Image (cartoon, grey):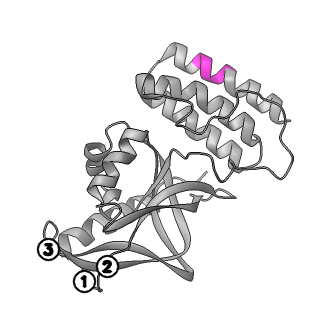
Amino acid sequence: MSQKVLRELVREGKARLGASPTDQAAASLQKRAMLLHLDGHLTANEYRTFMDGVKKHILGADYNPHLHGSRSTSTRRSPPKQTRTSPDSPLDVYFAYGSNMDRTQMRERCPHSKYVGWGYLNHHRLEYVGQSSRWGGGVATVVPHRGERVPGYLYFVTPSDLSRLDRYEGTPRIYRRKIVNVKLGDQPGTTRAYTYHRVDGATPHPPSPSYLSIIQNAQAKMLRAPRR
């Protein structure tokens, strides 16, 4: 069944990119592949194979399969329980929360990033800590907390994007990058992604109204997003 889905997806990809070879069309195809993978219609190897082809279009010269988690271009079926990449595979998905939910800010910080969709980091909560001179108040971090969830946006990112994010987030002294499992919208299953969490022991502090409005506006857009 998954081989048939992959063949249909490849045909769709060739038709769409042939008619409109744009980053928007390529990103849309890559998002569709992720949803099919999360739904169990594509195995992990099939998902990575298709992603390789799309990434070559999206990332161009910045694409390097060894940096983007591709171990093989084989479409051989994986064991039934294998639904995600192996834990040691380099990731290229980023979960943005806080002020990085501002799409304009993300384009400035990560110029090669491509928006995937909205999602939730389950069993975590949002806290505001420290005193940011830029924002005039506390800034967001995520902390484990059973039963709660943090909304955010998912992006495909390049290694250079991640390096830029590391600098903006003050890694590793202020924030540190970690791997989390994120639920993509209202789809079943989760996808592995990078995100950042505060590690410098900053104490709680309320955010400024301008900082809080970025998060509230982004969350409002998520609520209005069409469901699949």
The percent position of residue 99, horizontal first and vertical second, equals 29, 62
Helix or strand or loop: what does disc 3 sit on? loop
Q: Is residue 192 magenta?
A: no
The percent position of residue 204, horizontal first and vertical second, equals 30, 86
Q: Which residue is mark 2?
A: 128
The percent position of residue 65, horizontal first and vertical second, equals 56, 30
Q: Which residue is mark 3?
A: 136
User: Are the residues at dot 2 and dot 1 in contact (C-beta closer than 8 Å)?
Assistant: yes
Question: In this view, which residue lies farthest toward the front?
Answer: 173
Amino acid type, label 1: Pro
Residue, x 63% and y 50% (percent of image)?
88
The percent position of residue 213, horizontal first and vertical second, equals 25, 68
- As measured in the structure, the alpha-carbon distance from the residue carrying label 1 to the one carrying label 3 is 10 Å
Amino acid type, label 2: Tyr
Q: Is residue 14 magenta?
A: yes
The answer to whether residue 57 is left or right of residue 164 is right
Could you say which disc has been placed on residue 85 in the image? none
Residue 113 in view: no
The answer to whether residue 198 is left or right of residue 29 is left
The part of the chain drawn in magenta is: 11-15
Mark 1 and mark 3 lie on one chain; the one further toward the N terminus is 3
Question: In this view, which residue lies farthest toward the top?
Answer: 18
Could you say which disc has been placed on residue 206 in the image? 1
Helix or strand or loop: what does disc 1 sit on? loop
Mark 3 and mark 2 lie on one chain; the one further toward the N terminus is 2
Question: In this view, which residue lies farthest toward the bottom?
Answer: 204
Q: Is residue 31 above or below residue 10?
A: below
